[in-house]
Image (tube, rainbow, N blue to C red):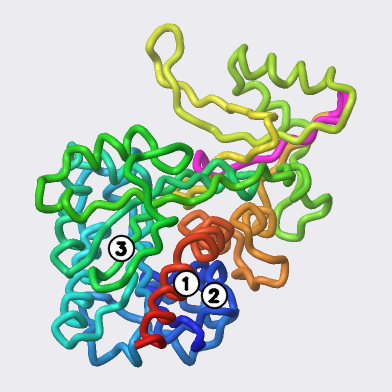
């Protein structure tokens, strides 16, 4: 049976490609960011990559007939921390460039069997839920049935990274009964997703699917397992710098540090600096630490507060530093032979803006490959 094929839009460093693996073949990849192109080409070569604005692509640019089109379109206007512009925003509005391409493929009878859109869970509530409804309406208009899952990368890697995956199937593609259910279920159908789906208009709701995937087993990987002792791109803080970071902690976070010192074993924590209000209502910057074996969600470095720190506690000895690029890559599920940009900020931006590879791999094995295999088997039987 022929290997499944795919297009990868908003490709970044090719993390969807990494998750789909060697059993899937890339026909075309696109991104508008030259630095991301450099990373993509460094890892996958330039044969399939096209640099440029998705709005300027046409169906004629897309070779072959792909089984899947993957689109991790920009989240800046949909994020809970974003500007609230939603699908009308310049960045997240690039969804419509993707939709136009898929619509053109439909008219040429080359529509992919599957579409996957990945974005932040803020999409479910963006613009009062209207953006999610509009996306589902647009996907249904392409001749698809639509379902979605909220998947946290923490099921697979030690990073808290909940994301929304909208998975569409062309209406003429048979769906194995084991892959759908009649009602929502945990852990992949969050309350926010259930609310958003319940608000869909009747004509869209009639094409809605509740995907049924097995709950993944508990991951044995801890944040401490990924930490480098001597990273090459960041340095351990001086005692003064560590003291300053600890001084930014609230009483509750200092208590966590005290408990870590008393644990009697090496403890590794993750720290983010966040702006909070003190007891007088004044804005102050706080260092918030967690020692639960999981790192916080990686973000693009839009400033010092968005970079994640590591705290290593050995008894009374406390060390801190920035998370290294390689550690960030490991938190995304990338192998150590994945080539990162030479500059720290470029590497951190690429990864903070990227896909959790392990989550893609799970979707591939438990849903996408099964859908394509079923479709191909039925075609072979005709």
| Residue 305 counted in the magenta span | yes
Mark 2 vs mark 3: give the one in front.
3
Left or right of 376 in this view: 352: right
Name the residue located 44 percent from the left edge and 43 percent from the top edge: 188
Residue 349 appears in the picture as rendered:
no
The answer to whether residue 188 is above or below residue 291 is below
Position of residue 144 measured from the top left corner of the image (x, y, whole percent): 22, 66
Label for residue 375? none
Mark 2, Cα crowd under 10 Å, few <14 / some 14-19 / many 20+, is: many
Q: In the rendered view, would you say 287 is above or below 363?
A: above
Camera-side residue: 48 or 286? 48
Q: Which mark is residue 36?
A: 1
- Mark 3 lies on residue: 168
Quadrant location, the C terminus = bottom left
Mark 2 or mark 3, earlier in chain = 2
**Which element is circle 2 on?**
helix
Is 80 situated left or right of 216 in this image?
left
The magenta-colored residue range is: 304-317
The residue nearer to you, when weighing 308 against 108, is: 108
Q: Residue at x 44, y 7 (%)?
A: 279
The residues tagged by marks 1 and 2 sit, at their Cα atoms, a distance apart of: 5 Å
Measuring from the top left, give residue 348's x and y in whole percent. Answer: 56, 57
Asked if residue 213 lies in the magenta stretch, the reply is: no
Which residue corresponds to mark 2?
A: 39
Q: Nearer the viewer, residue 133 or 335?
A: 133
Figure quadrant of residue 199: top left
| Callout 1 touching callout 2 (CB < 8 Å) | yes
Residue at the extreme front of the image, as rendered: 381
């Amino acid at each position: 049976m022929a290997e499944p094929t795919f297009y990868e839009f908003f490709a970044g460093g090719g993390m969807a490609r990494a998750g789909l693996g060697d059993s899937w073949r890339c026909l075309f990849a696109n991104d508008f960011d030259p630095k991301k192109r450099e990373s993509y080409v460094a890892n996958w070569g330039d044969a399939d990559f096209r640099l440029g604005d998705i709005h300027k692509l046409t169906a004629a640019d897309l070779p072959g007939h792909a089984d899947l089109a993957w689109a991790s379109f920009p989240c800046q206007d949909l994020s809970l921390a974003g500007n609230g512009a939603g699908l009308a925003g310049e960045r997240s509005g690039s969804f419509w460039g993707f939709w136009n391409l898929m619509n053109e493929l439909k008219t040429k009878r080359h529509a992919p069997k599957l579409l996957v859109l990945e974005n932040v869970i803020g999409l479910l509530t963006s613009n009062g839920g209207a953006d999610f409804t509009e996306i589902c309406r647009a996907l249904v208009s392409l001749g698809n049935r639509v379902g979605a899952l909220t998947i946290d990368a923490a099921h697979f890697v030690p990073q808290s990274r909940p994301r929304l995956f909208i998975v569409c199937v062309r209406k003429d593609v048979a769906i194995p009964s084991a892959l759908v259910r009649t009602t929502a279920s945990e852990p992949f159908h969050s309350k926010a997703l259930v609310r958003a789906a319940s608000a869909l208009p009747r004509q869209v709701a009639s094409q809605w699917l509740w995907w049924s995937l097995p709950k993944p087993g508990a991951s044995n990987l801890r944040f401490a397992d990924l930490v480098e002792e001597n990273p090459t791109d960041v340095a351990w803080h001086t005692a003064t710098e560590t003291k300053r970071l600890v001084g930014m902690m609230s009483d509750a976070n200092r208590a966590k540090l005290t408990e870590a010192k008393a644990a009697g074993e090496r403890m590794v924590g993750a720290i983010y600096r966040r702006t909070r209000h003190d007891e007088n209502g004044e804005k102050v910057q706080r260092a918030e630490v967690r020692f639960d074996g999981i790192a916080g969600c990686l973000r693009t470095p839009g400033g010092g507060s968005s970079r994640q720190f590591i705290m290593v506690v050995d008894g009374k000895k406390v060390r801190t530093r920035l998370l290294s690029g390689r550690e960030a890559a490991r938190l995304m599920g990338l192998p150590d032979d994945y080539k990162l940009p030479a500059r720290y900020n470029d590497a951190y931006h690429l990864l903070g803006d990227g896909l959790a590879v392990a989550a893609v791999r799970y979707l591939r094995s438990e849903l996408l490959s099964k859908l394509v295999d079923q479709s191909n088997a039925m075609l072979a039987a005709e």
